[in-house]
Amino acid sequence: MSRAVRTETSDGVRSIVLCRPEQYNTITPQLRDELAEAIDQADRDPEVRVMLLRAEGPAFCAGYGLDWSTEYQAEQEASERPWDSAMDYRELSRFVEVYLKLWYAAKPTLAAVHGWCIAGGTDMVLCADVIMADHSAVFGYPPARVWGTPTTAMWVYRLGFEQAKRYLLTGDEIPAPTAAEIGLIAECVPDGELTERATALAERMARLPGNQLEMIKLLCNQTAENMGFASSRTLGTFLDGIARHTAEGQAFVARAGEIGIRQAVRERDDPFGDYGSRPR
């Protein structure tokens, strides 16, 4: 089996690279486990001061691998067993805990985003300390329309109430320039310059003493902790399970079984004219 994540190190920066390009780096249990291992190893390595999360292929991360996740839910429902909310929360938390490693790692984490970064991809990347994207990147949480809620609940902490509600109550896509303007990400750079610019910023951070980096990160992150971040993400993770088991969520899974997940997603997004349903 080919790896889903690879790493490389230079000048105090550990690059953690998602490498499932043909699958748009969608999230699978394998990617989850390899990402957890890569973050833990970088946080332990005394030669590493900063982590840079980036990806190969046309997209940074197009969310969860919906083929396996909808099939998993369909199999559960076919068993005629009642939905076990505690088990669902426990299983989904295994993914959320990995994304949070970007947040709770002692060392700074920088993400370089290109292409799609949507749905579960935002659950992951919004846990990074600093996000940079190229001009053509697109963010968003389309499962807000049906079948999901943001598990890591980072939207309000990054955007504030008005902008978070504006984009989550529609599921609308957010082009990278807009994402930078409203504060979802730190910087939008010209296409073709992302890796160079993100690496340069990571190396600039790595010039600071490691202990300074860790103390400043801890100080900044504590503000979100004081605002109830732990309880927000607990609720977000639990509500995501509920959203997948509403009548509408179950109908979405059934429809995906009939016509395929990609066409079911297209039917969801066609009325909004964005993401894969955007006019070309």
Image (tube, helix red, strand yellow):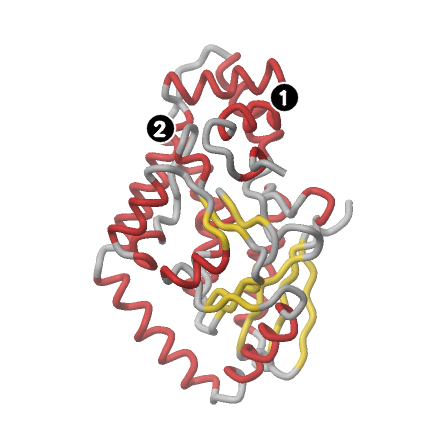
Please indicate whether residue 178 sits to the left or right of residue 262 in the image. Answer: left
Quarter of the rendering occupied by the N terminus = top right
Q: Quadrant of residue 278?
A: top right
The residue sitting at 39% across, 43% down in the picture is 150
The amino acid type, in three-letter code, at marker 1 is Gly
Residue 260 circle label: 1
Point out residue 131 in the picture as x, y percentages from the top left corner: 48, 65
Three-letter code for the amino acid on which mark 2 is drawn: Ile
> Where 38 falls versus 124 (above or below)?
below
Q: Position of residue 61 (x, y in %)?
A: 59, 49
Mark 1, other Cα within 10 Å: few <14 / some 14–19 / many ≥20: some
Reply above or below: 196 against 154.
Answer: below
Mark 1–mark 2 contact, CB under 8 Å? no
Of residues 173 and 216, the one nearer the viewer is 173
Percent x, y for residue 276?
A: 58, 36
Instruction: Tell me where residue 266 sits by quadrant.
Output: top right
Q: Residue at x 67, y 79 (%)?
A: 10
Tell me the element at label 2: helix
Q: Can you tell which of label 1 and label 2 is closer to the viewer?
A: 1
- Rendered position, 225 above or below 150: below
Q: Which residue is mark 2?
A: 242
Q: Quadrant of the C terminus?
A: top right
Q: Residues within 10 Å of mark 2 (few under 14, many from 20)?
A: some
Q: Secondary structure at mark 1?
A: loop
Residue drawn where x is 77% and y is 48% of the image: 2
> Would residue 163 appear left or right of 48 to someone viewing this image?
left
Q: Which sits in the foreground, 143 or 101? A: 143
